[in-house]
Image (tube, rainbow, N blue to C red):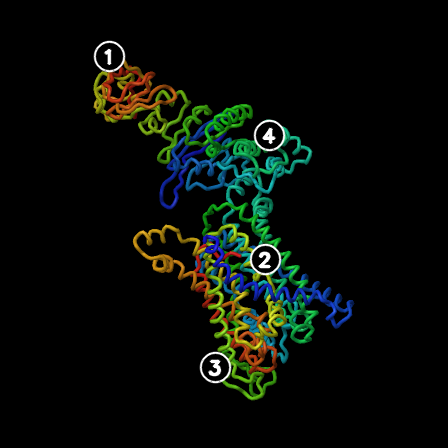
Amino acid sequence: MVQMRRTLPWLGASFFLLLFFFYPLIRILGMGLDWSGLKDGWNQVARLAGMTLWFTFYQAILSTLLTLIAGLPGAYLFAHYDFRGKKLFKSLTAVPFMLPTVVVAAGFNALLGPQGWVNGILMNLFHLDHAPILFMNTLGAILLAHVFYNITIVFRLVGNAWMRLDPQHGQAARMMGAKPWEVYWKVSLPLLRPAIMAAALLVFLFDFTSFGVILLLGGPQFSTLEVEIFIQSVQMLNLPLAALLSIIQILFTLAFSVFYSRVVAKVEVVNKPSSNPMRKVNTWRARLMVAILLILLGSLIILPMVSLPLRSIVRFDPAMGERTLQTASLTLDHYKELFINRNGSLFYVAPIEAVRNSLRYAVLTVLISLVFGFPVASALARPGRLERSLDPFLMLPLGASAVTLGLGYIVSFNQPPLNLLTSPWLVPLAHSTIAMPFVIRSLQPALAAIPDNYREAAAVLGAPPLRAWFAVNWPLVGRATLAAGTFAFTVSLGEFGATSILARPENPTLPLAIYRFLSQPGALNYGQAMAMASLLMLVATVAIMLIERMRLPGSGSF
Amino acid sequence: MLYVVDLHKSYEGAELLNGVSISVRESEIICLLGASGSGKSTLLRIIAGLEMPDSGQVLWDGKDLGSTPTHLRNFGLMFQDYALFPFLNVAENVAFGLKMQNLPKTEINLQVDAILKQVNLQGYETRKVTELSGGEQQRVALGRVLAPRPRLLMFDEPLGALDRSLREDLLAELRRVLRKSRVPVIYVTHDQEEAFALADRILLLHDGVICREGSPEELWRDPGSGWAARFLGMGNILSGQTLDEGRVKTSSGTFRTGDCQHSHKAGERVDVLIRPEVESGPLDGENHLEGLVKDVNFSKNGYRVTLQSDLYFILPEAPRVGERLSINLPEWSVQCLG
């Protein structure tokens, strides 16, 4: 009986993950190892895999280093200083990390692209007929977007560790004659090394599996493993090669994930919680430093996010009779266009259909992931041996690549009894798989925080079990459920990798529509992409802020 | 050597140090004794340069250290929880201060060996400090603070985190090492036994000022105030009023005292200390006290007997609870305090 009650919550989620996560991956594994299907010669395959792998590593390492360099001063700032607007700024830095890739790409495009603000302003100032800054389709664009995306990880992981460092270590070093810089170099840095390592590995993992940023900002000449899997499966229709690349990708991410969890275990041990008093910004040196850092960080994070909505309501037109001068005027045309089904447009439907699709998928994703995630989260909240041993498997989808997952669905669910390729459930199922770890991790701490004796007290007072649960637990769990649901909603809205493989052309989601508009020439297409990306950004930002407010302090770590 | 002159320091409006002046002479061990939260640690941190006073000076050989940063003061400070560097092993922790002085490697190795021998940690060189016991960590911290040969040593409740038996052993060892080093020492503690065992001179910090200082014997003879006597656990404190001819009137009776007439005018309100180490027996004089026994419990030096009046005495034999007891108070056992 006890056995039953312990295993019951797992049945649903286990079944779900087995069928929609492990089975597709195993199919890919089988396909990738069956080399008879490869169309190309071994030399060609090895060359492609080698080149792709090399670039994947190259850009990931470079991005990680840059993220660390840009993030460590900010981590220091957050850990040591109190200043006005710090709380707002801190929650603002959480936004990029969760923002859909298409939005980030569109934001950087609006800021630095050929039709973006900076180029527009420069062209007007100096009467140029070409955009002076070439940003799109460069390695620089990829690196900048990766820094934008992942800098929060450094802020949070290293900043928190820095804040909890025992100040006595530094003081002890000072007493023994260490100069201030020697304290940082010889004491703080070694103490922070595990946290920095953990942050770097996590950033590296995200950069390594980066897809949208590379595809949208890097253009055709750059491809990482993830992008190449997409190209081979969608454009070249060379599924065996895509599967082979997927295996390489899975092996590497698995290795990094294992390494990462070992480093994280170390972080917990070294830092005991002790609070440092925050410094006030009251000397001119501190003021200058805080100001410079805030301006740099602010422009990195805020400029792309502000450029985007601004660009969506502004039209650049050539001025009358002038070849090089442009005029900018406010317009709502880009938004009005969303409702119009233009002939010859890429869509057979109005762009607003993409919004409708995205919302429908997102709602289904919330339902599916909550239904399967909730029982598991409550089981994990009171972990027994079973829970502890199964826990790591639940988190696996976090490290798996979305494109690979999409590819897995294509090869797994293409024939009866499970022919889902045309089903409206296909995309939400993939999104739910990806969202599941987030949902479980947001629910679990809230459920674990409920003392057993609340329910017992309610029972003693005469409440039947179900009633007791709703009367006592729901008020506490409700918030967490809302946060978890919002998480799933946001993940689904912005998901690009799996969707780009799975969605049917006539049923695009919002990110796919933005991608298509962005890759088409013309000011109107550009403007519509800006408009849709702005809408997506608005919804995502509100959702992220909501999650930040809802979740319990200290929870939601990776 | 070290002079601290009229230090003031307040935290969030509350005055913590309110004009503290102390001096430390060559190879002298002073113990700074005070309740927790009295500002002892803050005083140490100001001397160390880790915090700045609101006003007042820290002088070394007549030179004001106000603008000398911590790392140039060449003082040593051992923290309560040691603050050993977890990423360095035992030898590297001890060598840290020597490395900061840019000594040659061979010299550093020699000195580290000598220090480890001094604190009984030979063979521990490559051990991780996180794997040591509390007592061993304490020795590493002691070695680390001694190694750079600071001109002043400061200890912030260094035995606070250890259990009792270990504390007594380490206290003896600390005494030996400190005496041998001949460096002036400021030792901060809230434990009066530690202070009495270690100090050449004890300073009592109360209400932001040094309210009493002197050798352990002097303090024991005359704690100076009712607060100090109570803090040092010296006996019963009653409030009273002096009468003529060296007598003092309290709620428990009127007693003749040894020295009240010298220090206090008749009619003055005073705190009266009645020391508990007395004898019971047939009454033999003017100074005596009677009462019903309320409670008896065993203590190290005899039986602690509490009377109905809440006065307590240490007696060699245990009376029964409820028994009527007569106690002789020799003149030395009753004392008027400031």
Looking at the image, residue A287 sits to the left or right of residue A251; the answer is: left
Q: Which mark is residue B283?
A: 1
Q: Which mark is residue A332?
A: 3
Looking at the image, residue B266 sits to the left or right of residue A216; the answer is: left
Question: Tag 1, which chain?
Answer: B
Q: Are marks 2 and 4 on the same chain?
A: no
> Residue shown at 48%/52% (left/top)?
A383
User: Is A510 situated above or below A175?
Assistant: below
Q: CA distance from mark 4 to mark 1?
A: 58 Å
The residue mark sitting in front, 2 or 4, is 2
Residue annotated with mark 2: A202
Q: Are marks 2 and 1 on the same chain?
A: no
User: Is B331 situated above or below A521?
Assistant: above
Q: Position of residue A207 (x, y in %)?
A: 61, 62
Q: Residues within 10 Å of mark 2 (few under 14, many from 20)?
A: many
Q: Nearer the viewer, residue A252 or A386?
A: A386
Secondary structure beneath disc 2? helix
> In the image as oriented, which residue stretches furthest toward the front?
A1
Question: Tag 2, which chain?
Answer: A
